[in-house]
Amino acid sequence: MSEWTFITKHGMVLFSISKGRDKMGRGKTAREIGDEVGVTERTAHKIITDLERDGYIVKTRVGNRNAYRIRPEVPMKVADTEVGELLELLGWKRRGRKKAADTPEKAD
């Protein structure tokens, strides 16, 4: 019987990123994310690239590491909900930014 997980590796990498920094307060490396999720560093890099390409995260270089910012307003591919809503169910806390739907539109 094969093993399966309820949440995909992409979801697990996104959740690892959402948990924030390492024990020293720095952004996590792909190796650290991979170790936490149970995938190789190479696989973690590929997944991070996928998440960035599809707009779920924004990657910024800080010194010799990357910092990741989650874009919680991006809709999930298979549901009519935002990725931030799923992360909040898993205990993630939004930082200072309101959801796109909560932001008033500018008048022309």
Image (cartoon, rainbow, N blue to C red):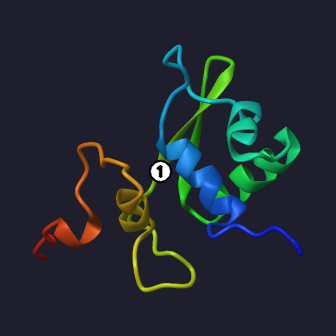
Which residue ends up furthest to the front in the rendered image?
1
Image side of residue 38 versus residue 78, left or right:
right
- Above or below — where is 21 with respect to 43? above
Q: How many C-alpha atoms fall within 10 Å of the one at disc 1: few (<14), some, or many (≥20)?
A: many
Query: What quarter of the picture does the N terminus occupy?
Result: bottom right
Image side of residue 44 versus residue 21, left or right:
right
Q: Which element type, helix, strand or loop, lies under badge 1?
A: strand
- Above or below — where is 21 with respect to 46? above
**Could you say which is closer to the camera, residue 62 or residue 78?**
78
At x 48%, y 84%, the residue is: 79
At x 42%, y 58%, the residue is: 87
Q: In the figure, residue 27 lies in which quadrant?
A: top right
- Above or below — where is 96 with respect to 3? above
Image side of residue 87 versus residue 64, left or right:
left
Residue 4 x, y percent position in the rendering = 76, 70
Amino acid type at image mark 1: Ile
Residue 9 x, y percent position in the rendering = 71, 60
At x 40%, y 78%, the residue is: 81
Total marks placed: 1
Residue 65 x, y percent position in the rendering = 66, 24
**Could you say which is closer to the camera, residue 100 or residue 24?**
24
Badge 1 is on which residue? 70
At x 68%, y 39%, the residue is: 36
Residue 32 x, y percent position in the rendering = 70, 31
Query: What quarter of the picture does the C terminus occupy?
Result: bottom left
